[in-house]
Image (cartoon, coloured by chain):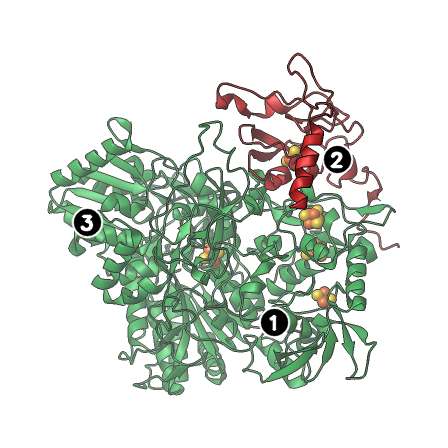
Chain colours: A green, B red
C-alpha cells in the first residue's frame, strides 16, 4: 500500500479554506467539467474583443461573459440541440463582411477571431421575430400562471422587446393531464423547446414522459394520465422555461417569487446535502427550489428534497411546549419546568440526532457532558458509521462530490440503491455512464455540448457501472452488470474484487464461479479506468460491505500508486456524518446507563427513538427513565411518551451546520421566524447568546470541526455596513399583512444569529455564495438568473462553492488488509431480513408532507418468488414480521434468494436491527415463535 | 429678479380668479368615474369575482398596503382567499388599478375615508367586493385566458381552436 498519496483522479489534493471567510470550492475544475482545461481564444462581439474558452459554443461564451442573449432549449447541464431558434446572432465571414448571416449561437463553436453581432438590428429583429412566433399560440395566462414572476418566457419576451401581440388567428389548445401529487400540467403554455423530454428521458432516464403528435401540435406529457414516475420529476418545474410544469404543492398555497422570504439552506432529507432555497410567506413554508452549488446538486434536486418540506407546517408540528401531566405550557413555565427537571435529575443521558445541526448536538453534548452524549441512531447504523469513518480516516480514500462522481468512468455500487438512499447521487451516476459517450465524441471531434450528435455517435455505449445489491435498483437499466445477493455475499464479492485488483489482498474462498467471473470483470474495469469510483453506504446496514469497499479502495490505491481512490458513502440523514464525527456513544450505552441507575433523566434532541431500536427496547428505556424530555419540531411516538416536550425550530427556522456525505460542512439559515413558541434546539439547551459563539466553541473543542466557522460568514458580516435581505426588493404587502391583527406595523424581527435580515432592506449585490438567499438579476427573474452568479455557464459559483470539506481528502495511509467474511450459515426455513429503502417513505420528516406520503409504498415483506413458493406464501398473504405486526407478502422478482426485504423507515414498522436478523415467516394460525 | 417679480405677479393675478374650492360638505364637487378614491373589487359580467389573486396590484403598490393570498376552487379558478387593503396606508395612487390584468381592482370617486380608529381603515375582501362590474362592464378575464374553468373548457376561450387530438399526425 502506498504511504503517501499525492493526488486523486479528480484534481490536486484538496486544500483547506483558502482566502478568508469563504474557503470556497476546494479545487476548481477548469473546463466544462468533463475535459481538460482548454486554451483561451478571442472573439469580437459588436466590435469589442472578448476572451472566451476554446471548445465552448457561442451562447455559453456570451453568457459566461455576463452578456444577455435570449435562449430556451439550451441548458448548461444538457447542452444544445438548436430546437428553439431563439439564440440567433449575426456572424460575419471576416473583417470586411458587413452583412453577415444569422447563426444559432448555441450550435456554433467559438473560433479564434470570430466576429459576431449581438445587438445589430438584424440580430435583434430576428430574435424578436422568433419570440413572436413562439408566442402566437401562447395563452393569456400570466395572472393565473404559477410561473408568473419567475418565468423564463416572460424574461425572454421582455428581453427581445416583443411587447404587442399582432397575431389575431386562433390559438391551438391542449388538454392537460393529472401527473400525480407533485406536478401541475398546463400544456397550452408550451413553446415546444423540448427541454422537458430531454431532461426527463436523456438526463434522468425516465420513460414515461414523451412528446406526441407533430408540427405545432406537439404535446409533452404521458401516454395517459398518471404519476410521473421518475424520482427527479420535480426539476421539470425549473427546467421548463414556461408554466407547463409547475409545483403542485406550491400552487396549493401559492405566492409569487417576489413575495417569498428565502434563505440559503441545505436539504435535510438525506445525507447528500443539496443546497436549497426554502421560501416563506405569511408564516408558513411555501416551497423549496434548487439553489445552485457547483460541486453538489448543480441545477437539480430530487423529489424528496423538493416536495418533502410539508412537515414544517404539517399537522404534527409542535408549536407549544407541553407537559404530560398538565398539557400545554407557556414559554416561561416550560423553561422553569426544564430547569427544575434538569436540576432534579440524578444524571442526564443526552440523545442527539442525525437530523439536527452540529451546533444543536454540541449544545446537548455540553449540557450533559461528552460521556453522556449519545448518537441516537440504531446500533447497527452506529457500527456502520464508525467503520466508515475508520476507513475514511485511515485509507487513501477521496470522498467525491457529485460533480466529481459525474466524471467517473467506471463505477461499482456495493449494497446500495442510491436512488432511494442518496437520490441526487444516482442522478450523478447516470451522467457518469455517459463518459464513454463523451470519450467517443472526443475521438470524433464532436464538442460535448452537441447533445444530439454525441448521443447519436455513442448509441448505447456506456461507461461500465456494476451494481451488487440485495434488490433490484433504479439504476439497473444503465448497469453493465448487476448482481443480486445478500449483504454478506456482496461483501465477499467486494473482497474478491480487491483481490483481483491487488493480489496481496486476501483471496475469498468458496465463491460461486459466476461471482468469481464477475469479480474479475469488475476488477479489470476498475483497474483500467482513469477515474474509478466506488459507491456504498449504510443502506444495507452491513459493516462487511463497508470493509469490502475499504479493501477495494486500498487495492486500487496500491495498484495506482500516488492516487487516492474515489468513493462515495451514502448516509441516511442530513447530519449522519457530522454526528458520527462527534464520537457519540451508542444507543445501547444509553439504555445501559439508564438501566444501571447511573442516570434517571433522558434529554432527547430531535429524535424519535422508536425509529432507532425495537419497540420493546425503547418502551423499556422510556419507562425506566424517571424523566423524559424531548426537544423536537414534530410530534412522534417518543415525544408522546415524554414528560416534557419542548418545541424546536425546523430547518427552515433555525441556523446551523450540517456535514454531508461528501464530508462537506455546510451552513443553513433560517428562512423564517420559528413558528409558535418553537425556538432553535440549542437555545433550549444552553446559555449561548448567538450561533457564532456556539459554532466557535464546537470548533475549539473538537479538532475535526476546527474549520467550520469558515463555512459561511458570521453574524457580524456586513456589505457596506448592511445585512443581506431575505426578501426581494419587490416584496409586497408589508403594511397590510399584519394589519388585521395589529394596525401598528411591527418592527422587522432582528436576526442576531446571521448576517441575513428578515427584511427587504439591505445590500442588494455582492452576496457571498454561502449567504445568497435567492438568485435574481435585472431581466432575469427565473432561477436561470443563476448564470449571473457563476464563474462560467454551468461552472462554479463566483466566489467559490460554499462549504468546507472536513474529511476524506485521501490523506489516510493504510490499514492492514481485512479478512473477508465467511459465507453465512444457511438457516433452514428462515430468511434474513434486509431493509429496502424508498425515496418516498424511508425518510422521517418528508413523510409528514402529504404529497410525499402519497407516493410511499404500503408496508410489505418482499420475497423472491421462488422463496415465497418454497415457503408456501402467495402474493398479498399476511405474515407476521414481528409480534403482532402483520404485513402482506410482496413477490419481488430479482430480490436475492434467502432474504426478506422490509421497507426501511416506514411509520410504525419494526426497525431492522441489523442486516442480519433471521426471520421465520408465520402465517395466521401458526404458533407464534 | 425678473422671474421672482413674474411669480409674484402670477400669484397676485389668482386673487381675482374664481375659487376652485367649494364649501364641502354642504357643496359637493362633481367627481368623475376615474377619480381615485376608495378602492373596490368588482365582479365580472357573470357575477363571479374578477380578482384572480395574481398579486400584481400588491407588487406595484408603492406603500405595500395590499396583501392577499391565492386559492383555487375545484374547477381551477383562482381567487383570493383573503384580500386586505390597509387604507390608513393607501395613497390612492391608482397604480394597482393600472396593474390589474382583470379590471378587478378599481378606484371609485368615494373619497370620504375618515375614521376615528385606524383599525377601521383595514378593509377585508367582504368590505371591498361590490356586486357589479364597475367602470369596465364587458370584460371577463377567463373568457380570454387559456386556463379551463367550470363552464369554459379548453378551446372555448376567445380566439381558441379546439383542443388538439394528439393521436393525429395530420397537419
Ligand atoms: S408561462 Fe410565463 S409567459 Fe406563459 S402564462 Fe405563464 S408566466 Fe405567462
Ligand atoms: S413543456 Fe416546457 S420544457 Fe417541455 S417543450 Fe414545452 S415549454 Fe419546453
Ligand atoms: S438527494 Fe438528498 S439532499 Fe439532495 S434533494 Fe434529494 S433528499 Fe435532499
Ligand atoms: S391585480 Fe387585480 S387580479 Fe391581480 S390580485 Fe390585484 S386585484 Fe386581483
Ligand atoms: S437556445 Fe439556441 S436554438 Fe434554442
Where residue B166 appears, as percent x and y from the top left, is 79, 50
Pointer 2 residue: B142
Where residue A592 appears, as percent x and y from the top left, is 16, 50
Q: Is residue A203 above or below residue A395?
A: above
Q: Are marks 3 and 1 on the same chain?
A: yes
Where residue A748 appears, as percent x and y from the top left, is 42, 41
> In the displayed structure, does residue A459 sit left or right of residue A623?
right
Pointer 3 residue: A367
Distance of label 3 from label 1 (alpha carbons): 52 Å
Query: Which chain does the numbered disc 3 sit on?
Result: A
Residue contact at pointers 2 and 3, CB within 8 angstroms: no
Query: Which chain does the numbered disc 2 sit on?
Result: B
Residue contact at pointers 2 and 1, CB within 8 angstroms: no
Kindly report which numbered mark, 2 or 3, lies closer to the viewer in this rendering: 2
Q: Secondary structure at mark 2?
A: helix
Q: Secondary structure at mark 1?
A: loop
Kindly report which numbered mark, 3 or 1, lies closer to the viewer in this rendering: 1
Decide which of A581, A884 is in the foreground and name it. Answer: A581
Q: Can you tell which mark lies on residue A22?
A: none
Q: Is residue A428 above or below residue A670?
A: below
Q: Secondary structure at mark 3?
A: helix
The answer to whether any part of residue A617 appears in the image is: no
Q: Can you tell which mark lies on residue A65?
A: 1
Q: Give the position of the C terminus of chain B as an image quadrant.
A: bottom right
Determine the image quadrant of residue A784: bottom right
Decide which of B46, B28 is in the foreground and name it. Answer: B28
Q: Residues within 10 Å of mark 3 (few under 14, many from 20)?
A: many
Look at 38% across and 75% down and name the residue there: A398
Distance of label 2 from label 3 (alpha carbons): 61 Å
Where residue A566 appears, as percent x and y from the top left, is 42, 75
The answer to whether any part of residue A577 appears in the image is: yes
Amino acid at each position: 500500500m502506498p504511504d503517501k498519496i499525492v493526488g486523486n483522479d479528480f484534481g490536486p489534493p484538496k486544500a483547506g479554506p483558502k482566502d478568508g471567510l469563504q474557503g470556497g470550492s476546494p479545487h476548481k475544475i477548469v473546463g466544462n467539467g468533463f475535459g481538460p482545461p482548454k486554451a483561451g481564444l478571442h472573439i469580437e462581439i459588436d466590435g469589442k474583443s472578448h476572451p472566451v474558452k476554446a471548445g465552448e459554443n457561442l451562447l455559453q461564451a456570451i453568457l459566461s461573459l455576463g452578456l444577455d442573449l435570449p435562449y430556451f432549449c439550451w441548458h448548461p447541464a444538457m447542452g444544445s440541440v438548436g430546437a428553439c431558434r431563439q439564440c440567433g446572432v449575426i456572424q460575419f465571414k471576416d473583417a470586411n463582411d458587413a452583412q453577415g448571416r444569422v447563426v444559432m449561437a448555441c450550435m456554433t463553436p467559438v473560433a479564434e477571431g470570430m466576429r459576431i453581432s449581438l445587438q445589430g438590428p438584424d440580430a435583434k429583429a430576428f430574435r424578436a421575430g422568433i419570440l413572436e412566433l413562439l408566442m402566437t399560440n401562447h395563452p393569456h395566462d400570466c395572472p393565473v400562471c404559477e410561473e408568473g414572476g419567475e418565468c423564463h418566457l416572460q424574461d425572454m419576451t421582455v428581453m427581445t422587446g416583443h411587447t404587442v401581440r399582432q397575431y389575431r388567428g386562433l390559438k391551438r389548445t391542449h388538454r392537460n393531464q393529472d401527473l400525480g401529487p407533485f406536478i401541475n400540467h398546463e400544456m397550452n403554455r408550451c413553446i415546444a423547446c423540448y427541454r422537458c423530454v430531454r431532461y426527463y428521458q436523456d438526463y434522468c432516464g425516465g420513460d414515461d414522459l414523451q412528446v406526441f403528435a407533430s408540427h405545432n401540435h406537439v404535446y409533452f406529457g404521458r401516454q395517459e394520465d398518471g404519476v410521473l414516475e421518475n424520482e427527479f420529476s420535480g426539476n421539470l418545474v425549473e427546467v421548463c422555461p414556461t408554466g407547463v410544469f409547475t409545483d403542485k404543492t406550491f400552487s396549493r398555497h401559492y405566492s409569487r417569487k417576489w413575495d417569498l422570504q428565502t434563505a440559503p439552506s441545505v436539504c435535510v432529507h438525506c445525507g447528500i446535502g443539496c443546497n436549497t432555497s426554502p421560501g416563506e410567506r405569511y408564516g408558513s413554508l411555501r416551497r423549496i427550489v434548487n439553489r445552485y452549488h457547483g460541486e453538489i446538486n448543480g441545477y437539480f434536486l430530487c423529489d424528496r428534497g423538493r416536495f418533502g418540506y410539508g412537515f414544517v407546517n404539517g399537522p404534527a408540528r409542535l408549536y407549544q411546549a407541553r407537559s404530560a401531566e398538565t398539557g400545554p405550557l407557556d414559554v416561561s413555565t416550560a423553561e422553569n419546568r426544564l430547569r427544575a427537571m434538569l436540576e432534579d435529575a440524578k444524571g442526564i443521558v443526552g440523545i442527539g440526532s442525525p437530523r439536527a445541526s452540529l451546533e444543536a448536538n454540541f449544545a446537548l453534548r455540553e449540557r450533559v457532558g461528552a460521556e453522556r452524549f449519545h448518537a441516537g441512531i440504531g446500533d447497527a447504523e452506529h457500527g456502520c458509521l464508525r467503520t466508515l469513518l475508520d476507513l475514511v480516516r485511515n485509507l487513501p480514500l477521496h470522498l467525491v462530490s457529485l460533480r466529481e462522481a459525474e466524471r467517473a468512468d467506471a463505477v461499482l455500487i456495493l449494497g446500495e440503491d442510491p436512488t432511494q438512499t442518496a437520490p441526487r447521487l444516482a442522478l450523478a451516476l447516470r451522467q457518469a455512464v455517459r463518459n464513454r459517450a463523451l470519450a467517443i465524441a472526443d475521438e470524433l471531434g464532436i464538442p460535448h455540448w452537441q447533445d444530439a450528435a454525441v448521443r447519436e455517435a455513442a448509441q448505447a455505449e456506456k461507461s461500465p457501472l456494476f451494481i451488487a445489491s440485495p434488490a433490484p435498483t433504479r439504476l439497473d437499466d444503465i448497469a453493465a452488470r448487476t448482481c443480486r445477493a445478500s449483504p454478506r455475499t456482496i461483501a465477499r464479492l467486494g473482497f474478491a474484487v480487491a483481490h483481483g485488483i491487488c493480489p496481496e489482498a486476501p483471496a475469498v474462498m468458496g465463491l460461486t464461479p459466476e461471482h468469481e467471473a464477475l469479480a474479475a470483470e469488475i476488477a479489470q474495469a476498475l483497474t483500467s479506468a482513469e477515474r474509478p469510483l466506488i459507491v456504498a453506504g449504510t443502506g444495507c446496514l452491513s459493516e462487511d460491505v463497508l470493509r469490502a469497499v475499504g479493501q477495494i479502495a486500498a487495492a486500487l490505491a496500491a495498484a495506482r500508486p500516488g492516487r487516492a481512490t474515489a468513493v462515495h458513502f451514502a448516509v441516511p440523514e442530513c447530519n449522519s456524518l457530522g454526528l458520527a464525527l462527534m464520537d457519540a456513544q451508542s444507543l445501547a450505552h444509553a439504555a445501559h446507563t439508564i438501566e444501571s441507575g447511573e442516570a434517571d433523566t433522558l434529554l432527547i434532541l430531535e429524535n424519535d427513538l422508536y425509529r432507532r431500536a425495537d419497540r420493546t427496547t425503547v418502551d423499556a428505556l422510556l419507562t425506566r427513565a424517571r424523566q423524559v424530555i424531548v426537544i423536537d419540531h414534530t410530534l412522534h411516538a417518543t415525544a408522546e411518551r415524554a414528560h416534557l416536550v419542548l418545541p424546536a425550530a425546523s430547518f427552515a427556522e433555525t441556523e446551523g451546520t450540517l456535514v454531508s456525505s461528501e464530508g462537506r460542512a455546510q451552513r443553513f439559515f433560517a428562512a423564517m421566524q420559528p413558528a409558535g413558541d418553537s425556538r432553535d434546539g440549542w437555545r433550549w439547551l444552553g446559555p449561548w447568546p448567538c450561533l457564532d459563539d456556539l459554532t466557535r466553541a464546537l470548533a475549539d473543542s473538537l479538532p475535526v470541526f476546527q474549520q467550520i466557522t469558515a463555512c459561511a460568514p458570521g453574524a457580524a458580516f456586513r456589505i457596506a455596513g448592511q445585512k443581506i435581505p431575505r426578501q426581494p426588493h419587490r416584496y409586497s404587502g408589508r403594511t397590510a399583512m399584519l394589519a388585521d391583527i395589529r394596525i401598528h406595523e411591527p418592527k422587522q424581527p432582528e436576526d442576531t444569529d446571521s448576517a441575513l435580515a428578515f427584511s427587504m432592506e439591505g445590500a442588494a449585490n455582492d452576496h457571498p455564495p454561502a449567504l445568497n438567499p435567492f438568485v435574481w438579476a435585472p431581466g432575469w427573474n427565473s432561477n436561470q438568473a443563476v448564470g449571473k452568479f457563476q464563474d462560467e455557464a454551468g461552472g462554479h459559483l463566483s466566489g467559490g462553492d460554499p462549504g468546507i470539506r472536513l474529511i476524506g481528502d485521501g490523506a489516510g495511509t493504510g490499514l492492514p488488509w481485512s479478512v473477508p467474511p465467511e459465507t453465512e450459515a444457511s438457516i433452514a426455513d428462515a430468511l434474513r431480513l434486509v431493509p429496502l429503502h424508498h425515496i418516498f417513505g424511508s425518510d422521517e420528516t418528508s413523510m409528514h408532507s402529504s404529497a410525499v406520503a402519497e407516493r410511499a409504498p404500503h408496508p410489505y415483506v418482499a420475497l423472491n418468488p421462488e422463496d415465497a413458493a418454497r415457503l408456501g406464501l402467495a402474493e398479498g398473504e399476511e405474515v407476521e414480521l414481528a409480534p403482532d405486526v402483520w404485513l402482506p407478502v410482496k413477490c419481488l422478482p430479482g430480490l436475492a434468494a434467502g432474504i426478506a426485504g422490509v421497507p426501511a423507515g416506514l411509520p410504525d414498522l419494526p426497525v431492522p436491527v441489523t442486516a442480519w436478523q433471521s426471520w421465520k415467516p408465520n402465517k395466521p394460525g401458526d404458533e407464534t415463535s | 429678479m425678473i422671474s421672482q417679480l413674474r411669480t409674484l405677479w402670477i400669484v397676485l393675478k389668482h386673487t381675482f380668479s374664481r375659487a376652485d374650492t367649494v364649501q364641502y360638505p354642504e357643496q359637493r364637487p362633481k367627481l368623475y368615474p376615474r377619480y381615485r378614491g376608495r378602492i373596490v373589487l368588482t365582479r365580472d359580467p357573470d357575477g363571479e369575482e374578477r380578482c384572480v389573486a395574481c398579486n400584481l396590484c400588491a407588487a406595484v403598490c408603492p406603500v405595500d398596503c395590499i396583501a392577499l393570498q391565492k386559492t383555487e376552487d375545484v374547477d381551477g379558478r383562482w381567487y383570493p382567499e383573503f384580500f386586505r387593503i390597509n387604507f390608513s396606508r393607501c395613497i390612492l395612487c391608482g397604480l394597482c388599478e393600472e396593474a390589474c390584468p382583470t379590471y378587478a381592482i378599481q378606484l371609485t370617486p368615494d373619497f370620504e375615508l375618515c375614521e376615528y380608529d385606524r383599525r377601521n381603515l383595514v378593509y377585508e375582501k367582504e368590505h371591498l367586493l361590490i356586486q357589479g362590474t364597475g367602470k369596465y362592464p364587458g370584460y371577463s378575464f377567463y373568457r380570454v385566458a387559456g386556463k379551463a374553468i367550470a363552464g369554459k373548457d379548453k378551446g372555448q376561450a376567445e380566439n381558441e381552436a379546439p383542443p388538439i387530438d394528439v393521436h393525429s399526425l395530420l397537419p
